[in-house]
Image (cartoon, helix red, strand yellow):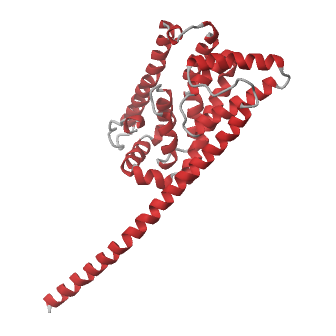
Amino acid sequence: MRNVFQRVNTTDVDADADIETEKSPVTTKAASTSILLRILLILIVGVGTLAGILALVATIPGLSLPSSLEDAKHIVQVLRDYIQNNEEGHSKTFIIFTLLYLWKQTFCVPGTILLNLIAGALYGMSTIPLLCFLTALGSTLCYYIFYFAGADILEHYIPERLDKLRGQIDQNRSRMFLYLMTIRLFPFAPYWLINIVSPFVGVPVWSFFITCMLGIIPYNFVTIEAGEMLSEVESVSDILNPWFIIKLLVVSVVPLLLSFIGKRKHKEEDVENPEWEEEKDVEPLMSEI
């Protein structure tokens, strides 16, 4: 009798396995189709908005998108002439610059450093608050685009990494603001990847926005200052002077100091509250990225 039941149970298990095997290709195909559709949606939105921006760029004679330092210098001269010779030149230049800057931040397109140089040459230090706000706004738009359309993509391609990042965020939730500021201040962090994974690892949107806006201030300050002397330089080496390098090194040291202060404060709290678990070394979010 026992052997009969064993055979029956084995048969049932095999039947269930066969059913799952039959369903698996269909499920996988449906998931792949959903991922492709989401990727296509992001591409359509990105290309469509870029087409609109390029149409505005074409309304200014001689204007193009910058891809090198020489392009940036040429664009600055074109825009200066256009602003001087057209009543609506200032407002149109501002609109095009704002939309292009937002587009690059939203869709994680590299090249904002050239826009920073152009902004520094045209407007000077007064443009730093605007660039910080546009960076935070564009990054938040990226946050929401992937929140609504990118979940399947990331869960499909980097599920283990997302789980690790969720653990990092949970371990640092009591000092979330300092933790995010440390990441944003670090000049070599992959900001684009931080933007797209943040909604899936438990980063609150307001903390994301504020730390993004504040953490980018040192970088914008350095690049805008370099842009102010853009018209005077002949090569990149004229911009990368010793003082410029020193300021970049200072920016790199700041997050290390903040991290040290945060960990020290956390240890003091552990001493005052012995029932808490002993603090474990936490790797920064960017190390997992």
Report which quarter residue 72 is drawn in. top right
Say which residue appears at 50% left-offset and 13% top-offset: 247
Say which residue appears at 45% left-offset and 62% top-offset: 31
Report which quarter residue 109 is drawn in. top right
Q: Position of residue 181 (x, y in %)?
A: 51, 31
Which one is nearer the viewer's eye here, 45 or 168?
A: 45
- Please tell me whether residue 91 is drawn above or below residue 159 in the rendered image: above
> Residue farthest to the right?
87
Q: Indicate the quadrant containing the N terminus: top left, top right, bottom left or bottom right.
A: bottom left
Total numbered labels: 0
> Residue farthest to the bottom?
1
> Residue farthest to the front?
62
Q: Position of residue 147 (x, y in %)?
A: 55, 50
Q: Position of residue 104 (x, y in %)?
A: 59, 35
Q: Position of residue 7 (x, y in %)?
A: 18, 86
Q: Indicate the quadrant containing the C terminus: top left, top right, bottom left or bottom right.
A: top left
Which one is nearer the viewer's eye here, 121 or 277?
A: 121
Is 50 placed left or right of 258 in the picture? right
Say which residue appears at 42% left-offset and 54% top-offset: 156
Say which residue appears at 36% left-offset and 43% top-offset: 276
